Amino acid sequence: MKARSRHRGQPRPGTPATTPDVHADKLQNALRLHQQGQLDSAEALYREILQASPRHSGALQLLGVIAGQRGQPQQAIELIDQALAIEPANAAAWSNRGNALLELKQYTDALKSYDRALAINPRHADALHNRGLTLHNLERTEEALASYDRALKFKPEYPQALNHRGIALCKLGRQSEALTAFRRAVVMQPDVGEFHANLGKALFELRQLEAAEDSLRQALKIEKTSTAFDSLAVTLYQLGRFGDAVDIYRQWLAFEPDNPIPKHMVAAGSGEAPERAGDQYVANLFDKFAGSFEKTLLGLGYRVPELLTAQISTARGSDTAPLRILDAGCGTGLAAPLLKPLASRLVGVDLSGAMLDKARERKLYDELVVGELCAFMASRPAAFDLIILADTLVYFGAMEEAFSTAHTALAPGGMLAFAVESRSDGPDYQLELHGRYSHRPDYVTRLLADSGYTLQSLEDIVIRRELNADVAGIAVVARREN
């Protein structure tokens, strides 16, 4: 759940200390048109004022607001800076300058502008709210929450601040409190789909799945968004209503035909699976999932890195020589603390830049690369002594290319360690309704032998919990033949 929207507040000229009285009526007319969304008409009046009085700070500032609303934040800053040079004690202008900087993702400078606005007017609710958004983007969530709370103290009927307060509370793990904020926002402004969607996601996290479904369906009635479609489909899946979930994915695909996530999930529900998940699907999925990945997996009893490293240790026996290790599909680096003690060099590759950002924070990898793992392995002949694919091959059906390129990247005698979800009958592999592939163990062992590996060990494991049931899998260690 992200703080996506920004509420700038109604445009206002600030304190018109240097504004000639002769333009007051025209400025008010322009401001009224501006607040009604008639930007062209408002701009024409602001420019008329400036033609007569080029140093009219109110008109300059509000022209800057219009530039920001039109997606021209740099122009907005230039106009607002002109207004501030004339009237530096204008809290609204400093706040609007912060909005433009926030749009440019210049968060530190945006924060300074909001603080200047609040030094002039500590009760400026819009500045407090947007200051909270800035702090949220700086990962200073507790401070963001405090800023939203101050905004609501001075402006209790502020649904956008309540919505973002709920988002901050969810990020802090306080979902029950977030429900109250989201519900108040929905009551105040029931026609905003984002508020219903965020309420639905909070209800989902609290496992109130039927209520979550209701909120998410209401969100989609108001506005179709990928977030609401995704959340509703996952909710229906968790309710065990697989057909309904696939139907939502089909609706989502009709709405966004080029979105790789519903495309992949519709394929999972149709039985017409591709040989592997598309790169764009994997990248998009894990970019979205990066912030909650570890908490979610660990909550599902995921222990694949521990199980694989134990098997690797057994396969190595008394050999303690440091290894050149590739963590292929490394994600946030969950396996890195286990692999680093074994490594002379530890390299990670993943399609998701957001996941690698998290992995980089561990400071355990010697190299991290955004890329498709098969292409990467093919480009590094005999570069590694161990390649581990902990939770990666579940996005491959056919594994010939993965095994072949790993063989290229391994030095003679090097080891390949991986885990996959397993199936006891049916085809060699199948794309399951949860979007991952399962494989028959005999297909895996046959393909390893055909690809130039000697099997060292194969153990039945539990990959994770899903829908209150164990997901069966196999953990495999194989050695590249010389």
Image (tube, rainbow, N blue to C red):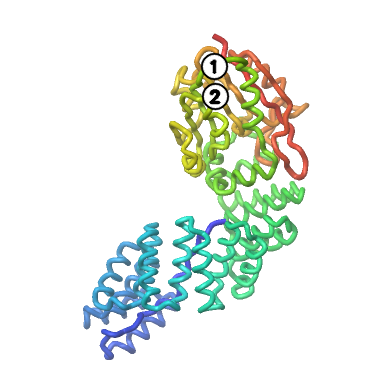
Q: In what quadrant of the picture does the N terminus appear?
A: bottom right
| 450 left or right, relative to 327 | right
Q: Is residue 90 above or below residue 252?
A: below
Residue on which disc 2 sits: 387
Query: Given contact means CB atoms under 8 Å apart, are the residues at marks 1 and 2 in contact?
Result: yes
User: Residue furthest toward the top?
Assistant: 482
Look at the image and tell me whether residue 70 can be seen: no
- Which amino acid type corresponds to the residue marked 1 in the rendered image? Gly
Residue 38 image point, x, y percent:
41, 76
Which residue appears at 49% of the width and 44% of the height? 354
Mark 1: few, some, or many residues within 10 Å (few <14, many ≥20)?
A: many
Residue 347 image point, x, y percent:
47, 29
Which residue appears at 55% of the width and 43% of the height? 286
> Which picture quadrant has residue 106?
bottom left
Mark 2: few, some, or many residues within 10 Å (few <14, many ≥20)?
A: many
| 376 left or right, relative to 97 | right
Q: Is residue 81 above or below residue 3?
A: below
Which residue appears at 52% of the width and 21% of the height? 405
- Which amino acid type corresponds to the residue marked 2 in the rendered image? Ile
The foreground one among 176 and 425 is: 176
Q: Name which of mark 1 and mark 2 comes first in the sequence.
A: 2
Residue on which disc 1 sits: 414
Q: Is residue 359 above or below residue 390?
A: below
